[in-house]
Image: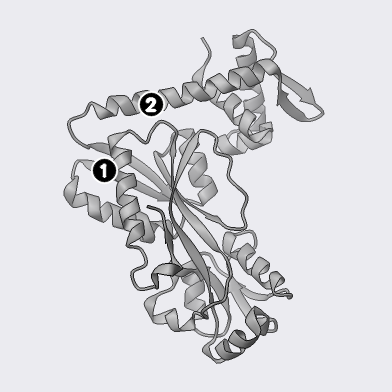
Amino acid sequence: MLDLRRMMLLSDLADLGSVTAVAERRSITSSAVSQQLRVLEEEAGAVLFRRDGRTLGLTRSGQVLAEHVRRVLVAVDEAVSAVAETRDHVNGQVAIATFNMGLPMLAAPTMRRLSADEPDLRIQVQQETSAAALRLLRQGEVDLALTCRYDFGGEDSSGGLIAEPLLHEPLVLLAPKAAHLKIRKNGLAALSNGPWVTGPQDSGLGVAVMRACEGAGFTPQIKHRLIGAQNICDLAATEIASAIVPRLSVPTGLEGLIVPDIEVGGRTVSAVVRAGRQRDPNIALILRTLHTVAADALPAAAPEELGVAS
């Protein structure tokens, strides 16, 4: 009988194309992945892989097995969900991994709403990057991931996951008030000689600043790099540097620093589950609540600023 965990590695290889990428997704070594795939090949009694230099690809037999493995993994999750549906009421524990702003924006309000109505449902939350949250979801360490994907980012490999978009959050420009008139007249280029604050170099916000400024014809003078949009807002509040941040991270008291009508992109916030788990009553309830919370997320801003999934 084929081992389910080894079949998961095969499915990952079909999605990602390299042993190294599979090892990163599963948080194990490349040698461990290769060893398990060799054992799977022996179990299957067929040649599943072919080497092209240092790349490990799938033979026709490997492609056929990978397609069936995807169906098996979905069927396992569907079986778990079907058993859960036999319960009389919602109960048990659901683990959620969320990106930084997903906690105050979505996860915490969802927990507050459900704690009174569903006392037997326990929600466990941990903060991770979006990539780490998806990795934990694929590994079965969590049941749901809250992620954000910037407009300039490529599509994530689905890998048996289902993403439900919750909202599209615009990015906004925070700038010293004294510069607003010049920015309205000359656009983002008015800030070409001024200092900027943003996230770490390879972070979504760090890339967002570079792309927006380069699109305006200049390279930003990044003087400060902080972790977390809320920290970036705090420094921008001193009006010593400009910033590009998600709209929902801007406190009410700093809305006067937002320069209107400056397009700097946005990001999509989604709830992601493994295919076949949407029918689980616990997860289905949390998904419905997340959609409700997302719809209420930005009451103070103009409705057209935020795209909310129905």
Could you tell me which residue is drawn at 58 percent across and 58 percent down? 151
Q: Residue furthest top?
A: 45
Q: CA distance from mark 1 to mark 2?
A: 21 Å
- Observer-nearest of 138 and 74: 74
In the picture of the structure, the residue carrying the numbered disc 2 is 78
Q: Amino acid at mark 1?
A: Arg
One can see residue 271 in this view = yes
Q: Which mark is residue 122?
A: 1
Camera-nearest label, 1 or 2: 2
Residue 172 in picture, x, y percent from top left: 52, 72
One can see residue 6 in this view = no
Q: Residue furthest right?
A: 53
Residue 197 in picture, x, y percent from top left: 59, 74
Q: Is residue 160 left or right of residue 212?
A: left
Relative to 193, is 218 above or below? above
Near mark 1 (Cα within 10 A), the count class, few <14, some 14-19 or many ≥20, is some
Relative to 16, is 10 above or below? above
Instruction: Name the colour scheme.
Output: one colour
Near mark 2 (Cα within 10 A), the count class, few <14, some 14-19 or many ≥20, is some
Q: Amino acid at mark 2?
A: Glu
- The image quadrant that residue 191 belongs to is bottom right
Q: Is residue 254 left or right of residue 193?
A: left
Could you tell me which residue is drawn at 54 percent across and 21 percent down? 69
